[in-house]
Structure formats: structure tokens, C-alpha cells
Amino acid sequence: IGHEITHGFDDQGRQYDAKGNLKGWWQAQDSVAFSKRAQKLIDQFNGYVVLDSLHVNGKATQGENIADLGGIVIGLDAFKKTAQYKEGKKINDFTPLQRYFMGYAMGWLGHERDQALANQILTDVHAPAFLRVNGPFSDVDDFYEAFNIKPGDKMYLAPEKRVRIW
């Protein structure tokens, strides 16, 4: 749900007013700030090599990447209000925070043949499934806390490189 809500404020959705009319309603400084933050996400996804030298097109996948990140953050904010999170009880040695991230990731488990993956990179506005997990997770501080991610770890991004749209 958070993913879909975020689409209302992504690179496309933000161009429409409350009645669905194509109309700029953001203040100029808000648009500039959004564009700078969104560009960081575009650059992040442009850097992902999927096959050989085939990169994700961060511009083409921008709206979905913004929505994925927004959905994770909105969901996490909601989860932190639950009794399950507040109790902090481990289950099978996993904390509630770890289970939150694992639950999201499990929804994207799968395997694609290289040919299908290449076709997706060239034609789809969605990043490959594994990057719809690893990409936004690397921008969420709570992920680092949950799994003790440190400099040198594969998914580590320096704090100043982590994308925060809102």
C-alpha cells in the first residue's frame, strides 16, 4: 500500500493535483529539492550492473524505485507502532526489525533467465526483483541496524550516499 501511495508523489504523480488534473502544485524550491534527491536514486540504480555490462536504467525505473523506497519506509514506520515491534521478542533468533526486512525480501524471491532479465532491463520500468530489495534497503538506516551492516559489506552505502526523498 505504501508503494502505491508513494506513486502519488513520485516523478510522475507529483505532476497531478488532487482532482487528477495535470497541474504543477509544488513550490519551486520543493521541486528542485525533490529533483536533486531523485537524481541520487537515479544515479544509484544506474550503477547497478545486472548482466555483463548491462546496467539498470535509473531514469526509466525512477518512479518505481521511488515508490519501492517510499513503501518500505512507510511500512517500517507503521510496523514500529505495533506491539510486536515494541515487545522486541526474537523469533527463531530474528528480531522484529530483521523479520520486517526479511518479510519484504521474501516477496521478491525468484529467478529469471538471463535473456528475460536482459529484456526486462531494456523494456520495463521496474528494476529486477533483487534490486527492488537490495536497492532501497541500502538506503534505509534501520536495515543497517537490523543486520549490523558495516563499511566494506556488499550492501553498505555511506550515510551521505543514502537516498532520502522525504
Image (cartoon, helix red, strand yellow):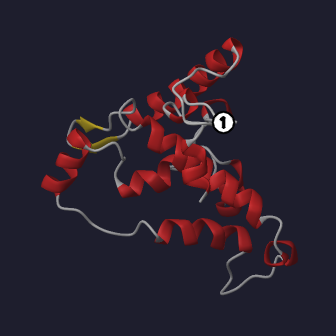
Tell me the amino acid under the disc marked 1: Arg
The percent coordinates of residue 129 (x first, y second) are 38, 57
Task: Please say if 144 is above or below 87.
Answer: above
Residue at screen point 70% across, 16% down: 27
Residue 138 visible in rendering: no
Residue 23 visible in rendering: yes
Residue at screen point 70% across, 48% down: 141
Instruction: Name, please, the residue furthest toward the bottom.
Output: 92
The percent coordinates of residue 37 (x first, y second) are 60, 26
Residue at screen point 61% across, 35% down: 163
Q: Nearer the viewer, residue 105 or 72?
A: 72
Task: Please say if 119 is above or below 98.
Answer: above
Q: Nearer the viewer, residue 101 or 124?
A: 124
Residue marked by disc 1: 164
Is 130 situated left or right of 85 in this image?
left
The percent coordinates of residue 160 (x first, y second) are 66, 30
